[in-house]
Amino acid sequence: MIAPPDAASVSADSFDLMFLVMVVFSGFIVLLVATLVIVFSIRFRSGSRANRHEVRRLVSREVEIAWTAATAFGAMFFFWFASAHFLRHAAAPVDAMEVHVEAKQWMWKATHESGARELGSLHVPLGRATILYMNSQDVIHSFFVPAFRLKQDVVPGMTTTMWFTPTRTGSFHLFCAEYCGTGHSTMLGEIVVMDEAAFAAWLEARPGSGSLVDAGRVLFTEAGCASCHDPASAVHAPDLRGIYGRPVPLADGRIVTADAAYLQDSILQPDRDVVAGFDPIMPNFSGLLDEDEVAGLVAWLRTLERDDG
Amino acid sequence: MTLEAEAGRGRPGQTLPRSYLGAGHSVRSWLLTTDHKRIALLYLGTITVFFLIGGSAATLMRLELVTPPGELVSADTYNRLFTLHGVIMVWFFLVPAVPATLGNFVLPLAIGARDVAFPRLNLLSWYLTIAGGVLVLASLLLGGVDTGWTFYTPYSSLYSNSYVTLAAMGVFVNGFGSIATGINFLVTIHTQRTRGLTWMRLPLFVWSLYAVSIVMVLATPALAVALLMVVVERLFDLGLFDPARGGDPILFQHIFWFYSHPAVYIMILPGFGVISEVLTCFARRRIFGYEAMVFAMLAIAIFGFFVWGHHMFVSGQSYYANLIFSFLSFAIAVPSAIKVFNWSGTLYGGHITFEASMLYALGFIGLFTLGGLTGLFVASVPIDVHVTDTYFIVAHFHYIMVGGMVTAFFAGLHFWWPKITGRLYSESFARLAALLMFVGFNFTFFPQFILGWMGMPRRYWSYPDDFQVLNVASSLGAVILAAAYLLPPVYLGLSLWRGKPAGDNPWDATGLEWTTSSPPPRENFAVLPVVDTEPYAYHADRVEPHRRGDASHRAVSQSSDPGDDA
């Protein structure tokens, strides 16, 4: 049936207000233009006895300036209105719960901080900010949850993020919104919002829970990371203790913050953002580690900061 | 005295040049013609064929979408259908529809020239379009392309198992036709204007062709680069868009939209020009705010180059880029709004009649307004995040492209048809088609705004049940629309052998094209006209005509010197 989409996140409510304001405004303009066109067409139809008085040049020039100015003012108002909303919801809270999302033709996979994994669905707790770190294994996909009024492309070779705070429990559509081939319209999923207790119980019951950091710690040695990145190593590689959240100067002069996306990218594509003062000698792990192992490593690197700081 | 000579009669006392249609009947006389009018007809035939192919694909898609599960065709077939529809309609119908078809016919006539500046280059443009079209049709016959008309990488470069290279080469070749037409029109407008036709006396249709030519010349090379990169990546495996080898999939989107956003203006600016001609003629009024209209068109052409990033708000580009592109997109709304208000203002104080062209033009104002206003929605970053890649976008650009440009094309085709063929079509059938198209169009595409807002993604072959009601409505509308599109070929075709002779100026319009015979002679004018007034001089300046008869002031006086064609 024709029903408004569910509104199930903090930004969805303010989105709906903004959308309504623009619909009302547009409706008003359409009515205005339609009225002008229809009234003029009838009143000034050929043979009508309407009084066609002279429009002095000055008057028409003033009319012109008036509606140009009004349009410019309106456009700037809506720019401000929309951009203010955008900036208000741009940055995720620092304590947001992290979930790693992996897209590939034609399925969605999610890995929670605890190591719990799910396929084709994503369970999140009510009222808690959740941030998704998203990667694609093949082509560009797009993570679209109409109930949250949010969409973010998932691009191979980079990590994109998206965050939300659910405000209603229930199950909501997840669509792939960027055309990705034969199975595009079947690349569907389900976002399940549960209250905090139910979510905790659900997470507890998942296999693999509680092991993400541990897995990362083991892997840090097994995969050979420690042999270079250990402070005692003979190889000249950056010391990773306390790396998380710090600004990192790069060889090309940029300075980036070592967030989860940066760490993930550095493991999968080490040549892209080389740290200043180091040679680009790190091997590429993109074919060697799967996304859960990368997520484990990132989780482990984050704990290094806590130990250190 | 032959019939053709009769049709192309000159002014009294002049020799009688033959109609361009009678200047040869062999196939060779058409395929090797350098007459801009004949080339325009070659284009008209070409885009009609492509419109039918692209329209059939759309009809099949709407049928498929009647039911939520994909039942009529397979997912792969559906993906090939929407790609075919997009590629054909954008590059082989919309882009050449008004500039290369109507523009080719009218431009030299409207500026009092004997032809375009480079008649042979003009013919080459058509052959390039045909060559490109043949490549695209070949890819269709071999098995189709499934990337969408946007050819996004890395899907198109590394993953698609379809005839991407062939189709991309087709569009690439066709692009050179666009560039050649653009250069030709720019030079023509600069050098071929008749005596007295100063820049500020140019009809707005000529200005719109000038603006669109700038965009075609400057933007199309970017498309060529983007498509060539896809082709060489597929052929030589260069890894330009492959992140594993240091490539960047997003790079393609930047280059592609650097062309394709201006291309939206290639597809709508000439429509602005057509509508300005038609409205003034049937309202018997000078255009409201001529100078503002000229500068608005140039502003749109130039601003159009700086807004491409608004197609990429969710691609992962930075917040700052999003805000800047959003700001520029709102800014471009201002000149567009000026045009809508000025068209409405033009009606004020007129003596309006409602011929078919005028119905199309009035419909255009409404549909373009709705299309433009929904442009404000998608210029807002947070709203675009929700509605981009949904049916809201599909509806938005169809309101501009079909509601705007296709409507303008029909307005222009009906307006100039008597000039092109020398015949009048059935006005009642034409009005019926115009009304049916307006109703069918809104019936088809308005529900799609709601579908997009509800969250239905575009390019979906199957969809959840929640979306069915509106999809059925949209498909019903498409039936009306398809029926409406089949009418003009019938009554316009009939007019060729049953139509009354049109006379030189059936609408009593002011443009120079109406001062020569219908159909015009090969050289356009027996004697080149000289211009001494502003355009749209339907009444004396600053005087309101009280009777319709007052409003047929002649804009043009004929030169008395037959040797003067400088």
Image: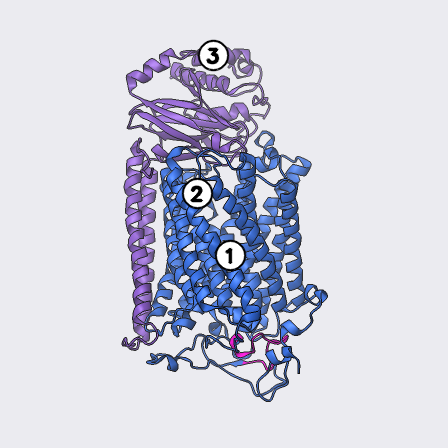
Chain colours: A purple, B blue
User: What amino acid type is highlighted by mark number 2?
Assistant: Ala
> What amino acid type should be assigned to the residue bearing mark 3?
Ala
Q: Is residue B246 left or right of residue B341?
A: right
At numbered mark 1, what does the secondary structure look like: helix, strand or loop?
helix
Residues at discs 1 and 2 in contact (Cβ within 8 Å): no
List x then y, in percent, for residue A163.
37, 30
- Name the chain letter of the residue that bears numbered label 3: A
**Image check: B218 left or right of A123?**
right
Residue A298 in percent (x, y) is at 46, 20
Residue B178 or B305: which is nearer the viewer? B178
**For residue B553: magenta?**
no
B525 within the magenta span: yes
Q: Are marks 3 and 2 on the same chain?
A: no
In which chain is the residue bearing label 1?
B
Dot 1 amino acid type = Leu
The part of the chain drawn in magenta is B513-529
> Does label 1 or label 2 sit earlier along the sequence?
2
Q: Nearer the viewer, residue A161 or B374?
A: B374
Q: Is residue B454 above or below residue B289?
A: above
- Could you give the CA–CA distance between mark 1 and mark 2, rounded to whole angstroms? 45 Å
Q: Quadrant of the N terminus of chain A?
A: top left
Q: Nearer the viewer, mark 1 or mark 3?
A: 1
The spot of residue B1 in percent (x, y) is 66, 83
> In this view of the protein, can residue A188 be seen by the observer?
yes
Dominant secondary structure of the residues highlighted in magenta in the image: loop
Q: State the mark number for residue B321.
A: 2
Please give the label number shown on residue B486: 1
Q: Residues within 10 Å of mark 3 (few under 14, many from 20)?
A: some
Marks 3/2: CA–CA distance: 38 Å
Disc 1 with disc 2 on a shared chain: yes
Which residue is the site of mark 3?
A215
